[in-house]
Amino acid sequence: MQRFAKIWIAGAVACLAALVLAALILPKSFGLTALSDVIQCLLLFSCTVAFIPRALQSRGRLRLFWILMVSGMGFWLFYQLFWTYYEVWLRAEVPDLFAADIILFLHIVPLMAALALRPHAPPDDYSTRLRRLDFVLMLVWWIYLYVLIVIPWQYVFADVSAYNRNLNSVYLIEKLAFLTALVVAGLSSKGGWRMFYTSLFGASLTYAASSYIANWALGRNIYYSGSLYDLPLALSMVWITVIGLLTTAGEPEAAGPRTSTFHSVWLARLGMIAVFSLPLFAAWALWDHSIPERIRSFRLVLTLLAALVMGIKVFVRQRVLDLELLRLLTQSQDSLANLKRLQAQITESEKLASIGQLVGGAAHELNNPITAMLGYSDILLATPLSPEQRELAGRIGQQVRRTKSLVASLLSFAKQSPAAMAPVDLNTLLRTAIKLTQAQWQTNKIELHTDLDMEMPPVMGDSNQLLQVLVQTLGNALYAADEAGNRTLTIATKLQNGIASIDISDCSAEEAVSSKEKTLGSAPPDPDSLRPLSGLGLSACQGILKQHRGRIFWENEQNTGVAIRIEIPVTAPAVQETSGSPAAGVPGMWQSQPFA
């Protein structure tokens, strides 16, 4: 314990000892009254200031908790200053109908609000705005209760005995509610927080007992300021000072979500109980004929006004709750959509894994006959042949070697092994792919037109794998063009923003691309017009392009034909010379979804 805190506590205990000695030695006099009132002001000032360092050292909900504690003690101090003003400064008796009594009554409300914050528990999902509205609703209800029961006997129909009786009854109800809240908070906490709540419960119980003892003495006309009946009150003040200086309550403790939800539900229920109590109070005011008519009318009008005010607050609270529920619903929908996307990705990954196993097994089985075919083609070329036969045998060997390369790529895809990266000329690969598919486009009588960017820089990649992608893609494009009855296919390469793109389209598709660029801009096309890439070879292409940080777009419409775009980032030097990044996409290209 710090030395300053020890001195502080010693001073508070000394003040309590001075009160005890004065009550035992000094007779009833102005000096005893002044000493008692001043010491009680000092002790209440000590209670208030003792919690201020906690508020300054904390943040968020903890800071608000300690600020509410300081506010409750401050109200108590403010009331004692009024009492001291009458007895010491004016040297007069405190009026029986004391207007400042409402300050004493309300000083417990911030303390109950502090307990409602549950500083010992982690933050829950209960909206901060809802918590504040609940606090305002309960504050209005407590004020209404005081004005309903106490104020009429003070201003509407003055009656000292009825005023004191009703004030003590309402104040007792409030203190019992606060003690109950302390018990609930203590049972739901542990460690330093449980010790704090237990100590505060003991001090509050002592204070409640002191009020009862003082009222008992007043009823027998034996109470006066500074008497022994004030000692339990002063003891509770010293106790609260010690709590504020020595408490070890700090950061929130771990708590289960069920407890947090239970607390939030009961906060809302208490607010609804407060609202539903208004008709009961109105009925009581209407049917209680033992009170004057003016008080009955006052209570009815007050209840109607309270119903209006609390009804507005309930409406605002419901509006805030609706917005909170809408936010939670939106989050739930987003989470569900993300979950569905994740499930789709997992399903796709499982499919690719199955395809990889199938491809691996098939590729191993194909290797042996392909090796034999390659050997026979080489033997055939070594025999005497006519020029026409030698050309055909060479083509057989070329196709067998291409098939062997394709099988090797499929094995690489199945193993998901990294490709051997090296600078690759896409234009050269395209010419090779066109030559390898010559039999297909000549047989189907399809004309190929090329528009190659001769200044295209190389891309980093595996030439065999990229050739497989181009051959597979070009083969699919030729098949789609033949199905659509189009006899012209255009192949173009270009570089934009550090990305090398390969566009394969028939004439009608090319016109459609131009139209989309003019009218649609960056808006996405109709999803129903997209056709996903399919087939074992294209699945392999997907894995290859992923390794090369590339993407593929595919659109196949019945009226416009086929349009394919392959995007691959160029090597580092070319990227530095242009702006943008591979993730930025290509301006002017409609944003079809890449196969991923």
Image (cartoon, helix red, strand yellow):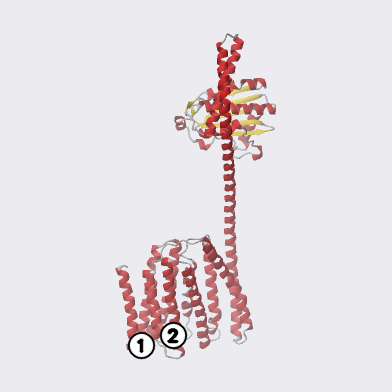
Q: Which residue is mark 1?
A: 30
Q: Are marks 1 and 2 in contact (CB under 8 Å)?
A: no
Decide which of tag 1 and tag 2 comes sooner along the chain. 1
Q: Is residue 178 left or right of residue 436?
A: left
Q: Nearer the viewer, mark 1 or mark 2?
A: 2
- From this viewpoint, is residue 31 visible? no
Q: Residues within 10 Å of mark 2 (few under 14, many from 20)?
A: many
Q: Out of 476 and 276, give the one closest to the viewer.
A: 476
Q: Is residue 508 visible?
A: yes
The residue lying at 60 percent from left, 76 percent from top is 303
Q: Position of residue 496 (x, y in %)?
A: 52, 31
Quadrant (top left/top right/bottom left/bottom right) for the N terminus: bottom left
Residue 284 image offset from top left, x and y in percent = 61, 81
Within-10-Å neighbours for mark 1: few <14, some 14–19, many 20+: some
Residue 345 versus residue 130: which sits nearer the camera? 345
Q: Where does the image place residue 517, in percent across and percent down from the top left?
A: 60, 34
Quadrant location of residue 299? bottom right
The foreground one among 550 and 455 is: 550
Q: Amino acid at mark 1?
A: Phe
Image: 458 above or below 14: above
Q: Residue at x 59, y 50 (%)?
A: 336
Label 1 SS:
helix
Point out which mark residue 381 bears.
none
The x, y position of residue 275, in whole percent, is 59, 72
254 w.r.t. 270: above or below: above
Left or right of residue 572: residue 408:
right
Q: CA distance from mark 1 to mark 2?
A: 19 Å
Label 2 secondary element:
helix
Q: In the picture, residue 539 is in which quadrant?
A: top right
Q: Which residue is mark 2?
A: 214
